[in-house]
Image (spheres, rainbow, N blue to C red):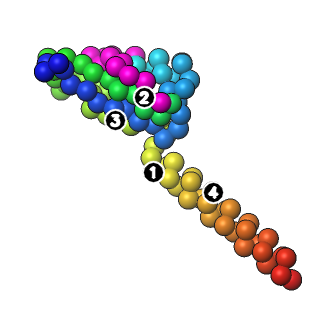
Amino acid sequence: MDNKEFKVITSNTPIFANPAKLKQVLAEEAQAGWDLEELIDSNKIRVGRDKSQRSSDGNRTLDPYRINVGMNQVLYLGIAALVTIAVIWAIIQAAAMSVA
């Protein structure tokens, strides 16, 4: 266990519920020596690898320590904010119509 390191990879959307997407992410992580340890839920997985894999990290095209996959978090939060604003606006409009 001392020779192993772990990380949790998260997604803003439930991509790990899709077997094809899960397989794609695991294939990408395998390039850096990471193997699936646990499917936590549809938004999180835990992977592990032998610490000896670190020596090749400088030559990898993919960040071996990435912890987020899928939709960019800024984009995700921006969409969530816009939807929230639209819902609040609709509620205010409905309330104004019922008063008039």
Question: Is residue 37 positioned above or below 42 on the image?
Answer: above
- Measured Cα–Cα span from mark 3 to mark 4: 26 Å
Q: Amino acid at mark 4?
A: Val
- The answer to whether marks 3 and 2 mark residues whose Cβ atoms lie closer than 8 Å is no
Whichever of callouts 3 and 4 sits on the residue coming sooner in the sequence is 3
Instruction: Kindly identify which residue carries mark 2.
Output: 40
Residue at position x 43%, y 28% in the image: 40
SS of the residue at dot 3? loop
Residue 99's spot in the image, x, y percent? 83, 81
The residue stretch that appears in magenta:
27-41
Whichever of callouts 1 and 3 sits on the residue coming sooner in the sequence is 3
Residue at position x 21%, y 25% in the image: 5
Mark 4 crowd level (few <14, some 14–19, many ≥20, 10 Å Cα): few
Instruction: Kindly identify which residue carries mark 4.
Output: 83
- The answer to whether marks 3 and 4 mark residues whose Cβ atoms lie closer than 8 Å is no
- Measured Cα–Cα span from mark 1 to mark 2: 24 Å
- The answer to whether marks 1 and 2 mark residues whose Cβ atoms lie closer than 8 Å is no
